[in-house]
Amino acid sequence: MTMKLKTDKLKVGFVGLRRGGGLVRSFAGHPRVEIAALCDLDTNSMSKMAGDFALNDQQLFTNFDDFVNAPIDIVVIATPIEFHANQSIAALESGKHVLCEQTAAYTLEDCERLVQAVRKTDRVYMMGENYCYFHYIREWKKIIQQGKLGKIVHAEGEYLHEIVDLLIDPQTGKHRWRYTRAPIWYCAHCLGPLLTLMDDRIVKATGVHSGKNIYPDEGLGFLDMEVGLFQTQKGSTIKILRSQVAPRHPEMIFYSLYGTKGFVENGREGGWGGTKGRLYIEGEMAKHPGAQVFDCPTIDVNAPAEALQGGHGTSEYYMVRDFIDAIDNHTQSPIDVARAMDFTVPGICAHEAAMKGGVWVDVPLF
Ligand SMILES: NC(=O)c1ccc[n+]([C@@H]2O[C@H](COP(=O)([O-])OP(=O)(O)OC[C@H]3O[C@@H](n4cnc5c(N)ncnc54)[C@H](O)[C@@H]3O)[C@@H](O)[C@H]2O)c1
């Protein structure tokens, strides 16, 4: 395999261009990157994007097998989750570095195959859990790493996002891939940032759901609410609440972390721009009135203007930089395959536990 000089541009190809569109724009803003190929079954959206980057017909693909063998260095995968494992493995085996959307896979067998594929190659794999890069999460990390909250003993996450139109096409009534996606399978947006802040892993999981009261006759994706309860390797506890159908508007992503010396949480106002959070540090703040209210923005105002291209504050900007740095420096990415499993596997186990009536299951560590 030829070694790239740092002055050479890295050629990047993208498969799946809906969410993937935000990733194309985020990569395009990186000085080391050349947008070199696109792949999607939908030729309309692909042609439009090709025009933005002056790509010719040889750089556009509807067939993944042809795309993955194109002359590119990096494959960015943003297709439905059922394709992630096979497409990541094929890309790694054809010598490409991979950034794959979350979650990494739907089944433990696919997770195992993916881990083996990454270990067999010398390529960089990263799971694109961009919520770890929200500006306020990066700021909380500094507070927690300084030990200001003591040991984190309990954390909670809530991701409530009504996306019924993404489960059933409102025009045709056709079921989309999320129709059968159990809510807690998709808990990496909560678990990723929490485990990053706690520097911890999940070892046991259980789950429970409230059934289908809102949409009684639909698929697994329509469980009203699903809760995952987790035990970590360091002995802490985590609770995560998920729904993709409950009428909770605006949508909300919420995190709280309780330490031996204080707590931090963002607000439940919802929306993507940022909320008012609360921070209490014992010894630094008075017990009355207690926590200080502070801003929790998703955007880092010190980042350049192009850092907003990804769609979720400045999260994609920093994520893409970490990924390219790992390639340039021949290091593991911050969300390498083991970490991707830490964020993916507990959700699979919690749903399995919920379907068995709330038993506890051991979560395999990869
Ligand atoms: N990190 C985030 O903030 C975030 C946000 C939204 C979606 N996502 C993730 O991004 C991924 C895609 O989600 P989406 O909402 O864009 O899904 P989507 O179904 O709306 O779009 C998927 C796109 O992939 C294309 N596609 C499907 N199968 C393909 C194949 N085999 N080969 C080539 N193209 C194919 C479709 O034509 C479509 O354009 C999922 O993994 C989802 O979890 C992440």
Image (cartoon, grey):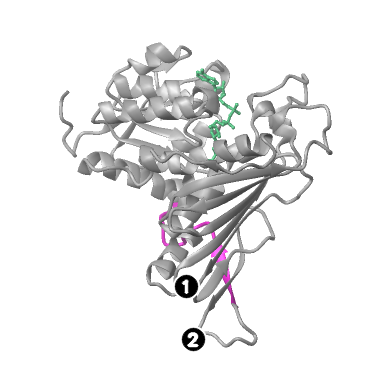
Task: Indicate the position of residue 54 as horizontal and vertical percent values.
Answer: 40, 25
Task: Indicate the position of residue 295 as horizontal and vertical percent values.
Answer: 57, 68
Where does the magenta region start and end?
292-305
x 43%, y 33%: residue: 100
Name the quadrant where ligand 1 sits. Answer: top right
Task: Indicate the position of residue 78 as horizontal and vertical percent values.
Answer: 49, 30
Q: Does the magenta stretch include residue 143?
A: no
x 71%, y 30%: residue: 220
Mark toward the start of the polypeptide (2 vs 1): 1
Depth check: 309 or 102 in front? 102
Depth check: 120 or 87 in front? 120
**Residue 54 appears in the picture as rendered:** no
The image quarter in which residue 44 lies: top right
**Are dots 2 and 1 in contact, CB under 8 Å?**
no
Q: Is residue 296 magenta?
A: yes
Left or right: 361 as drawn, with respect to 210 = left
Secondary structure, mark 2, is: loop
Which amino acid does the dot numbered 1 rest on?
Leu
Q: Quadrant of the N terminus?
A: top left
Q: Is mark 2 within 8 Å of ligand 1?
A: no
Which numbered tag is attached to residue 121? none
x 77%, y 26%: residue: 170
Which amino acid does the dot numbered 2 rest on?
Gly
Depth check: 173 or 13 in front? 173
Tag 1 residue: 149
x 29%, y 19%: residue: 71
Left or right: 151 as drawn, with respect to 4 = right
Tag 2 residue: 283
